[in-house]
Amino acid sequence: MIVRAPGSSANLGPGFDTLGMAISLSAEAGVIADGEPLPDRAQPADVRHPALVAFRRAGGEGELWVRSSLPAGRGLGFSGAVRVAGIVAAHAQQHGPDPSALAARRFEVLALATELEGHADNVAASLLGGVTATAGGHAVRIPLAIDVAVVVWVPSFTTRTEQSRHRLAATVPFADAVFNVGRAALLVAALAAGDRTALRAAMADRLHQDVRLASAAPSRVALDAALDHGALCAWLSGSGPTIAALCDPADAERIAAALPADGRARVLQIDHAGTTITP
C-alpha cells in the first residue's frame, strides 16, 4: 500500500503553532516487500529518517520506502508529512487500509505525530487536509468559503526550525498578544465567510515573522512582491525561508512570474484530501 501525506504551510500569519494549511505537494511511504521493486523515485528510509522513526514508534514492523516532492528545510512541512506518513503506514499495517479505520484513530495519530514533530500545526494539516486549527490536543478543519490558489516562492537556502525558534522572544508585550489574537480570529472568520478583503489585514503578525524575516532578506522581498502584484495575503511559510500567498486562481501565474528570480515560484492548491491510503 501507499500512504500519501500532503505537505503544509504552517504558522499562518498570526496563527503561530496553531494554524496550518495542507498543500498540493506530498510525501509518500510504504512498507518494503521482499522481492518486490520499489516505486519509481522511492528510496529506502535509513534508521534516522523521521518517517521510519515514526513508523517504528507507532508499532510498524519491517522497513519503509519514502519518496517526496517536498523540499526539506524550506518551511513546507516535509518533516511533518513524512512523520504522519510513517505513523499511518504502521496503523494501516496493523488495522488495514480502510479509511474508516484511520478516521477512528486520527486523534491517536495526531498525538504521536505532534509529540515527534514538537508542534501540531504542520501534522494536523497533513493528516486532515484543508486549513486546520489546533490547540489543547484538538484539531479542527476550518470551513472554507473561498476559491483561491496558493503561490509559493522557494529560495535555494534552508532554515532550521530549532535555530529559528531560538531567535524568538520568550515573552511578548500585552499589546502584541492582543494584536495576534485578534488577527488569528479575523483570519479564521474571513476564510469561513469568504471575505477576501479582510485576508491581508488578518494575516498580519507580531510574534515571529519579522524576527525570522530579518535574517532572510530575500524572503521579505518576495513576500512584498507577492502583495504588490495582487496577492490577497502573504506570509512566511512555517519557519521559512519559503513565502506563501493566497490569490485568485486567474492571477496565480502572473503573481508567480513577478516573484524574485533567485528562488523558484510555484502555483499550488490547498489539499483537501489529507492523508490517504492506496491499497
Image (cartoon, rainbow, N blue to C red):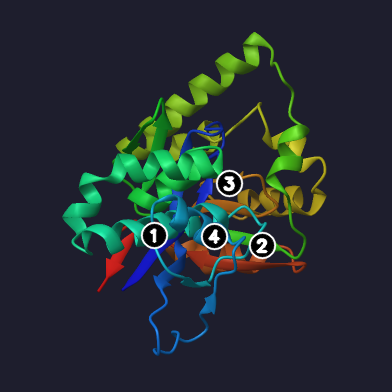
56 relative to 250, above or below: above
Mark 2 Cα within 10 Å, few/some/many (few <14, many 20+)?
many
**Which callout, 3 or 4, points at the residue further toward the start of the chain?**
4
Distance from Cα at disc 1 to Cα at disc 3:
39 Å
Distance from Cα at disc 1 to Cα at disc 2:
34 Å
Q: In this rendered view, identify the residue nearer to me: 95 or 145.
A: 95
Mark 1 Cα within 10 Å, few/some/many (few <14, many 20+)?
many
Looking at the rendered image, the quarter that the C terminus falls into is bottom left
Distance from Cα at disc 4 to Cα at disc 1:
36 Å
Q: Amino acid at mark 2?
A: Val
What label does residue 151 carry, if any?
Answer: 4
Q: Residue at x 40, y 38 (%)?
A: 111
Q: From the viewer's perspective, tell me whether residue 250 is left or right of residue 68.
A: left
Percent x, y for residue 147?
Answer: 35, 54
What label does residue 234 carry, if any?
Answer: 3
Residue where numbered disc 2 is placed: 154
Q: In this rendered view, identify the residue nearer to me: 99 or 215.
A: 99
The mark closer to the camera, 4 or 2, is 2
Q: Secondary structure at mark 1?
A: loop
Residue where numbered disc 1 is placed: 60
Looking at the rendered image, the quarter that the N terminus falls into is bottom left
Q: Amino acid at mark 3?
A: Ala
Q: From the viewer's perspective, tell me whether residue 117 is left or right of residue 249.
A: right
**Which callout, 1 or 2, points at the residue further toward the start of the chain?**
1
Residue 248 shows up from this direction: no
